[in-house]
Image (cartoon, helix red, strand yellow):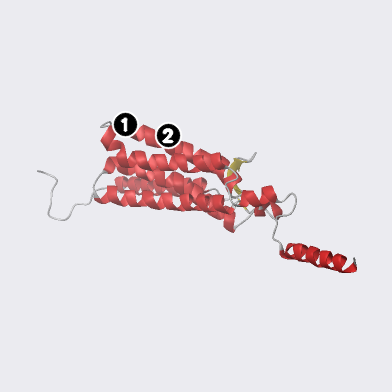
């Protein structure tokens, strides 16, 4: 009887020993582990790529389907505008936990705000979604810059304006999210638009002053010459 109990105990310990090194996912952690291997926001990820990729595809292939420059121009501008709004207000906040925005205070001063999630909330960002987000955010402006060089050296000036608009819209989101990533939570009081407008305002005033000074100077005649033609 004792021999049978000893054999049964030894057999039971052999059956239970492998469980000591088991890597089974703990209770309640199945969903968290599954989310790390899949996209948390598949529809958001789709629209993050859809509008900007569609704008590039339409720009490259619009000559094959339509000969109207106005129709192609309006279609691409609409896609770029939808992409800018979606990336700025939706996909950046959900996919990488970043947000940038602008507001005007009561005194009329424009302020830029760059925000980022902190601590545990930032760790909830899905790495696959973050990789897709940054790849599309960086690659598309580079591709539009290549289109800019092609249009410039190909003397396609009517397309050059469209490409410049695409670079500005894509570049604005790229700059904003890089600022959020590098300087988290910092508030920048200086508005880029106000700086640009001030620069052009000063240039216009200087040009007008130089033109007025030139017009006010009387014409000088060299000796020996008359004004008679």
The N terminus - image quarter: bottom right
Q: In this figure, which residue is indicated by the disc labeled 2?
A: 78
- x and y percent of residue 82 in the render? 48, 36
Q: Residue at x 48, y 53 (%)?
A: 135
Q: In this figure, which residue is indicated by the disc labeled 1?
A: 70
Q: Residue at x 35, y 44 (%)?
A: 163
Give the class, few, some or many, for how many residues have Cα within 10 Å of label 1's Cα (few <14, many ≥20): few
Mark 1 secondary-structure assignment: helix
Q: Is residue 185 above or below residue 90?
A: below
Q: Residue at x 40, y 36 (%)?
A: 77
Q: Is residue 118 left or right of residue 6?
A: left
Q: Is residue 8 left or right of residue 163?
A: right
Between 64 and 100, the one lying in front of the other is: 64
The C terminus - image quarter: top left
Q: Using the rendered image of the protein, determine whether residue 125 is visible from the camera's viewpoint.
A: no
Q: Is residue 34 left or right of residue 73?
A: right
Q: Using the rendered image of the protein, determine whether residue 50 is visible from the camera's viewpoint.
A: yes
Between 64 and 110, the one lying in front of the other is: 64
Q: Is residue 193 left or right of residue 153?
A: right
Between 5 and 225, the one lying in front of the other is: 5
């Amino acid at each position: 009887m004792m021999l049978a109990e000893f054999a049964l105990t030894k057999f039971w310990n052999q059956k239970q020993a492998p469980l000591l090194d088991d890597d089974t996912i703990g209770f309640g952690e199945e969903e968290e582990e599954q989310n790390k291997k899949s996209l948390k926001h598949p529809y958001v990820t789709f629209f993050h790529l859809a509008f900007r990729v569609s704008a590039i595809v339409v720009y490259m292939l619009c000559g094959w389907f339509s000969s109207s420059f106005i129709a192609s121009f309006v279609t691409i501008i609409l896609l770029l505008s939808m992409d800018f709004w979606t990336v700025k207000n939706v996909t950046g906040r959900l996919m990488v936990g970043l947000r940038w925005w602008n507001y005007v205070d009561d005194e009329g001063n424009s302020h830029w705000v760059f925000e980022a999630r902190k601590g545990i909330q930032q760790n909830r960002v899905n790495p696959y979604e973050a990789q897709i987000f940054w790849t599309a955010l960086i690659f598309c402006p580079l591709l539009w810059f290549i289109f800019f060089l092609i249009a410039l050296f190909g003397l396609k000036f009517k397309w050059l304006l469209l490409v410049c608009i695409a670079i500005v819209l894509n570049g604005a989101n790229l700059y904003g999210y890089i600022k959020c990533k590098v300087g988290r939570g910092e508030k920048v009081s200086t508005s880029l638009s106000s700086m640009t407008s001030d620069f052009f305002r000063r240039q216009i005033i200087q040009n007008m002053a130089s033109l007025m000074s030139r017009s006010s100077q009387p014409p000088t005649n060299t000796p020996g010459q008359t004004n008679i033609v």
